[in-house]
Image (cartoon, rainbow, N blue to C red):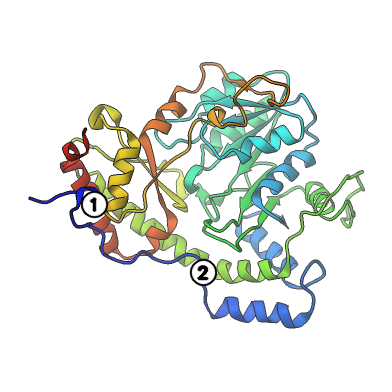
């Protein structure tokens, strides 16, 4: 009788997973170019070259590269003149940085629930949470799947609040053929080590507003204003990127389209395989027909607890033993230790109307597969499906 690998059996995934990051001749050539130029920071050629290309890639007029995706999100809010006490609407299912930048400028996160189908922010919950102090909506494109940008852009326009896109996981994603980051006033991207476009650490803000771009360039460079728009008073700091990082990003950008298409093919294939299993024990995240390009930085899969009746971590460990690089997703944002407690150090926040039961449920049911898995071949997808199938069929071994 076959046994689960976590109980001493043989794992189903035997292929070596694709490595990440990818290193090739383009990286070596550009890094050597920077090294020998003697110009390793601002003033070099590659940072402005990357900014121009990245802006064009995301159908935006301007890009401002900076130290990481957290500070580009903070820069976006500062450029919008968000003040202490202003309210910013955020989804309950996201990385802590989305809310931490709001705390850092003294504003108040208003946490709203998600659409259970794709774990993105629910526009109906956003509208219910908009009040007199609301200044912005942060739409997070979870896993690289765009949120409902039609509805969110309409709400932002109608209520005269800013739409900011947290596109940290969504390099090159499209909504109705238009790249994310260009729908709101600003879009913020991350180039951290795991991201589909990476230089180890780094980020970029894209915008169509020249004044916002000028402000953010000054903010990242000790307040020095170099733009053509009328000067604003800027208390700046050092959020600069280096030429070495720009070299890695330019090389990665050359491969990004091909890698994204490969991830899409493999992710859709794996989703089709999982959907063939009887009883639907694994439910891939819904992909809206208006999403013309997903990045699959994360492949989200829901394990309905009414079918499994097992702790999610138990199933995750069984999948890992079979060779599947699965892990649990986010907890509800307000369960992070930063939010818990009511002492003088606790940041101020509030929960939107109706709370966030879907985000709570997602924390109990949703697992992630990383983007590098989907750089493999179809046979790797078939082995991954076989591992999911095996864990489901022998789930009774996990009980007790």
Left or right: 368, with 379 as reference point: right
- Whether residue 286 is visible, yes or no, is no
Residue at coordinates 55% horizontally, 16% vertically from top-left? 353
Left or right: 178, with 346 as reference point: left
Left or right: 203, with 394 as reference point: right
The quarter of the picture where the C terminus appears is top left
The numbered dot on residue 178 is none
In front: mark 2 or mark 1?
1
Above/below status of 35 relative to 201: below
Above/below status of 53 relative to 79: below
Local crowd size for mark 2, using a 10 Å CA cut-off: few (<14), some (14–19), many (≥20): few
Which percent across, then down, holds residue 253?
57, 66
Q: Quadrant of residue 380?
A: bottom left
Residue at coordinates 51% horizontally, 43% vertically from top-left? 146
Q: Which residue is mark 2?
A: 255
Pick the front one: 323 or 345: 345
Residue at coordinates 52% horizontally, 77% vertically from top-left? 24
Pick the front one: 357 or 262: 357
Pick the front one: 186 or 113: 113
Q: Earlier in the sequence, mark 2 or mark 1?
A: 2
Report helix, strand or loop for mark 2: helix
Q: Quadrant of residue 58?
A: bottom right
Which percent across, then down, holds residue 76?
73, 43
Q: Which residue is mark 1?
A: 387
Q: Quadrant of residue 160?
A: top right
Q: Residue furthest top?
A: 354
Above/below status of 291 relative to 148: below
Residue at coordinates 44% horizontally, 27% vertically from top-left? 360
Which percent across, then down, holds residue 190?
61, 53
């Amino acid at each position: 009788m076959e046994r689960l690998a976590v109980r001493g059996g043989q794992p189903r995934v035997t292929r070596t997973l694709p490595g990440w990051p990818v290193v090739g001749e383009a990286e070596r050539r550009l890094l050597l170019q920077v090294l020998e130029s003697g110009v390793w920071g601002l003033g070099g050629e590659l940072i402005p070259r990357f900014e121009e290309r990245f802006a064009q890639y995301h159908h935006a007029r301007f890009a401002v590269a900076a130290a990481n995706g957290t500070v580009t999100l903070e820069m976006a809010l500062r450029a919008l003149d968000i003040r202490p006490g202003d309210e910013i609407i955020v989804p309950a299912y996201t990385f802590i940085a989305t809310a931490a930048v709001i705390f850092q400028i003294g504003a108040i996160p208003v946490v709203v629930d998600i659409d259970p189908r794709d774990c993105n922010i629910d526009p109906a919950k956003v509208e219910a949470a908009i009040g007199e102090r609301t200044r912005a909506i942060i739409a997070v494109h979870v896993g690289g799947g765009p949120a409902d940008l039609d509805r969110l852009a309409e709400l932002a326009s109608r209520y005269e609040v800013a739409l900011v896109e947290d596109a940290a996981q969504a390099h090159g994603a499209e909504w109705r053929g238009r790249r994310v980051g260009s729908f709101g006033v600003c879009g913020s991207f991350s180039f951290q080590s795991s991201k589909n476009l990476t230089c180890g650490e780094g980020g970029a803000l894209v915008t169509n507003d020249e004044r916002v771009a000028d402000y953010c360039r000054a903010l990242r460079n000790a307040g020095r204003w170099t733009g053509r728009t009328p000067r604003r008073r800027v208390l700046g700091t050092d959020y600069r990127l280096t030429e070495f990082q720009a070299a890695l990003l330019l090389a990665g950008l050359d491969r990004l389209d091909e890698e994204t298409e490969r991830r899409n093919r493999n992710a859709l294939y794996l989703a089709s395989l999982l959907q063939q299993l009887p009883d639907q024990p694994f439910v891939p995240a819904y992909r809206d027909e208006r999403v013309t390009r997903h990045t699959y930085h994360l492949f989200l899969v829901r394990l309905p607890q009414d079918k499994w009746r097992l702790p999610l971590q138990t199933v995750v460990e069984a999948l890992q033993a079979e060779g599947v690089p699965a892990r649990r997703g986010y907890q509800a944002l307000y369960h992070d230790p930063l939010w818990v407690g009511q002492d003088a150090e606790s940041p101020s926040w509030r929960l939107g109307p109706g709370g966030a039961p879907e985000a709570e449920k997602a924390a109990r049911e949703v697992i992630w597969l990383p983007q590098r898995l989907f750089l493999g071949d179809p046979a790797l997808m078939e082995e991954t499906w076989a591992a999911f199938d095996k864990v489901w069929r022998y789930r009774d071994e996990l009980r007790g």
